[in-house]
Image (cartoon, grey):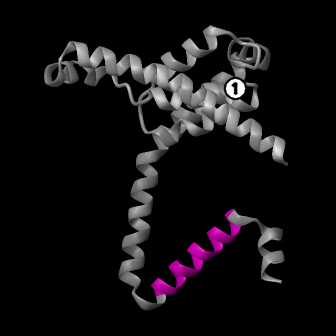
Amino acid sequence: MIRKFFDKIGASNVFLIVVVVIFAVVLVINPAACVQAFSGFLRLLIRMLPILALVFGIIFLTNLLINPKSISRHLGERSSIRGWLIAIAGGIISTGPIYMWYPLLSDLQEKGMKTAYIAAFLYNRAIKIPLLPMMVFYFGVRYTVVLTIYMVLFSILNGLAVERLITQKKGDR
């Protein structure tokens, strides 16, 4: 019976209900803690709103300017080395918290972007251009260049492995 209820209203609504119930219980037991928690939530929400607006703005622009045919051509199943270069370069130059990229990557995947490119993009986020001079200072030019090249090459291997695992999992269904 409980399982049917969860399936009917959805997991996200169950989570919302649980959080509201917890807040109600805390409000009865310790109102000051509830007010403090809610004000902390509001402060966090206010700090995140500009970032969320930027992400949704980028998604809006990609929906407006980039059509599925161009995604399929450059980043889809029939793309060539250009797709890898775009994914690698995009991952290297991307900034900000990683979780803010997930909606955009999901949107691009729905338009035809290969999973391998998404994995390569996320893998290459570890290469941070502003931190390369510091890395050269501490470890030297040779080490920095070799590590960066290895990270790019392994991002391709990682992308291929993820693509294969996802394809196998879809085949098992």
User: Which residue is found at the position 62% from the left and 8% from the top?
Assistant: 82
| 165 left or right, relative to 57 | right
| 134 left or right, relative to 103 | left
Q: Is 19 a magenta residue?
A: yes
Residue 92: percent from left, percent from top: 43, 21
Amino acid type of disc 1? Lys
Q: Quadrant of residue 126?
A: top left
Residue 76: percent from left, percent from top: 73, 19
The residue identified by callout 1 is 114
As drawn, 30 above or below 104: below
Residue 9: percent from left, percent from top: 79, 69
Residue 37: percent from left, percent from top: 40, 70
User: Which residue is found at the position 61% from the left and 24% from the top?
Assistant: 117
| 127 left or right, relative to 55 | left
User: Which residue is found at the position 47% from the left and 38% from the top?
Assistant: 98
| 120 left or right, relative to 106 | left
Q: Nearest the camera: 152 or 89? A: 152
Q: Quadrant of the N terminus?
A: bottom right
Q: Residues within 10 Å of mark 1 (few under 14, many from 20)?
A: many
Magenta part of the chain: 12-27
Q: What secondary structure is the stretch in magenta mostly built from? A: helix
User: Which residue is found at the position 77% from the left and 73% from the top?
Assistant: 6
Q: Is 67 a magenta residue?
A: no
